[in-house]
Image (cartoon, rainbow, N blue to C red):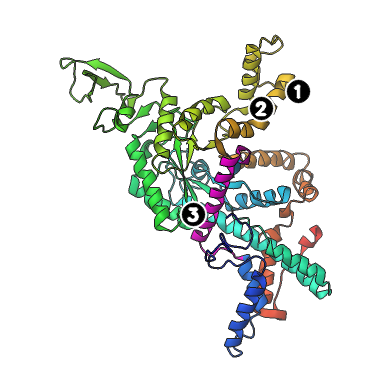
Amino acid sequence: MRTRNFAPEGLGGGMEPTPGQHSSSSAYQEHIAEVGRLITEKSGTWDGISAESVARMRLQNRFRTGLDIARHTAAIMRADMAAYDANPANYTQSLGAWHGFVAQQQMIAAKKHFGTTKGRYIYLSGWMIAALRSQFGPLPDQSMHEKTAVPELIAEIYTFLRQADARELGMIFRESDAARKAGDKAKEASLLAQVAEHETHVVPIIADIDAGFGNAEATYLLAKKCIEAGACALQIENQVSDEKQCGHQDGKVTVPHEDFLAKIRACRYAFLELGVEEGIIVTRTDSLGAGLTKQIAVSRTPGDLGDQYNSFLDCEEITPETARNGDVVLNRDGKLLRPRRLASNLFQFRPGTGADRCVLDCITSLQNGADLLWIETEKPHVEQVAAMVDRIRAVVPNAKLTYNNSPSFNWTLNFRQQVYDAWEQEGRDLSHYDRAKLMSVEYDETELGHAADTRIRTFQADAAARAGVFHHLITLPSYHTEALSTDNLAREYFGAAGMLGYVLGVQREEIRQGIACVRHQNMSGSDIGDDHKEYFAGEAALKAGGAHNTMNQFS
């Protein structure tokens, strides 16, 4: 059962509630009654405690531990996956976040614009951790950052999402107090009904753990930390840990399947040990763009998994006379083959085998415990992905993908080229277009430009329907939005506009668009703190939100 209010998963269906979670319809009064009994039992020593205040604090802090969050969000993802299987229009989405505040604002925006967080997750990008969170300073996406930064960011994101819950509920409680003071019982009841049906900002995080930062034991230890911090979904890739590269850079090196399967099992063991049985493992294959391997796979019988991996190696036939010291030699169909070894001591695959290797990687992962796939591609092209997924689904019919809608792609250029090529095949007159210059601004308002933009707009729905993509994500959007917005502000503020540059470009837009952060004191938790001060000290509380608080200018 999928729930997003204060009712725990399964409540009413015979399951025990998760600690700290109560039935949505009666949670408020149940908490008040329970705490009231406790206060009475203390023979006056707890009379300074308000049972209603405790009830509010409990409801504002629904999740007690990261494991509570992991179990809750895993159930959400499993329900979403089932909904997608029933109808691929039910695909899900996420945006990458490199800070808890970024993730918080994404979910606040989702609720503001769409009334719900349903189908919307957070992606935790290893690329952004490397570039923005490492103590070594900005780093490339090569697993050189501290692996502890991954669970630390997960915990940070959930701290901010839980604070968003507390803030939103706190504002409702304040309104209900005002209604009670005014004697408006109907409005008070209506507001408390909103509390009962409140949808949490706590959503699934898909956490990028690169290639596991070491061997299978290292992967298991990292997986545990991530799950304990709240992650319900771990994404791991089939590159070697010590040669890991960004999926959209050259020089990628993959590992034999048995090595990767050990890491998949390590993640599953971590989920099961911690009691998150519904945890999700996303296995990423970089084989499409990876032409190298560090190891020759172990093969015991012809046609086994190791033999299939080795069959893609670029080899040359040799004889005992032409063999050299240090050669690795394969015996295939009675012939001695020497895999081509580079100066880097790496072995290379035959050109043109990437798609075949991806298909084998995906089938093997699904048959050994993976839940979702990730095929890293060099361009956004529905049919390229669909061609591989068709082959995968011939073996595993319900195979589903997570797809990287990467900023590393030039989306405008790629889709204008796709439209150009499609029109060329149709025999259309393209004399007024130059394929080599399709990125030019002069094509923005042309028929081709509009056709390309339409394809970009429908790409996610098209890929969900045709290519088995259950989850669409953008890995590092906030990296780019921060750079763009800062550039715009700096241009205006440091230029002739001065303060008007900030007012026009930021504050007035915040007010006009109803951006909650325009009241930044409230967003940072000042009003929550005032509520607590009143709980703790009563009329003696020194609160910050009085008449002289300048945030009142934005009420």
User: What is the residue that sits farthest to the left in this orientation?
Assistant: 321
Crowd class of label 2 (few under 14; some 14 to 19; many from 20; radius 10 Å) = some
Residue drawn at x 29%, y 19% is 315
Crowd class of label 1 (few under 14; some 14 to 19; many from 20; radius 10 Å) = few
Inter-mark Cα distance, 1 to 3: 45 Å
Inter-mark Cα distance, 2 to 1: 15 Å
Residue at image mark 2: 455
Tell me the magenta residue range.
61-90
- Does residue 44 lie above or below 543 as drawn? below
Q: Secondary structure at mark 3?
A: helix
Frontmost of labels 2 and 3 is 2
Q: x, y percentage for residue 78?
A: 53, 49
Q: As rendered, which of 322 and 462 lies closer to the eye?
A: 462
Q: x, y percentage for residue 434?
A: 66, 13
Residue drawn at x 61%, y 90% is 44
Inter-mark Cα distance, 2 to 3: 38 Å
Q: Amino acid at mark 2?
A: Arg
Residue drawn at x 66%, y 57% is 199
Q: Secondary structure at mark 2?
A: helix
Decide if residue 351 is in sight here.
yes
Residue at image mark 3: 152
The mark nearer the N terminus, 2 or 1, is 1
The mark nearer the N terminus, 1 or 3, is 3
Q: Amino acid at mark 3?
A: Glu
Query: Is residue 116 found inside the magenta-colored segment of the image?
Result: no
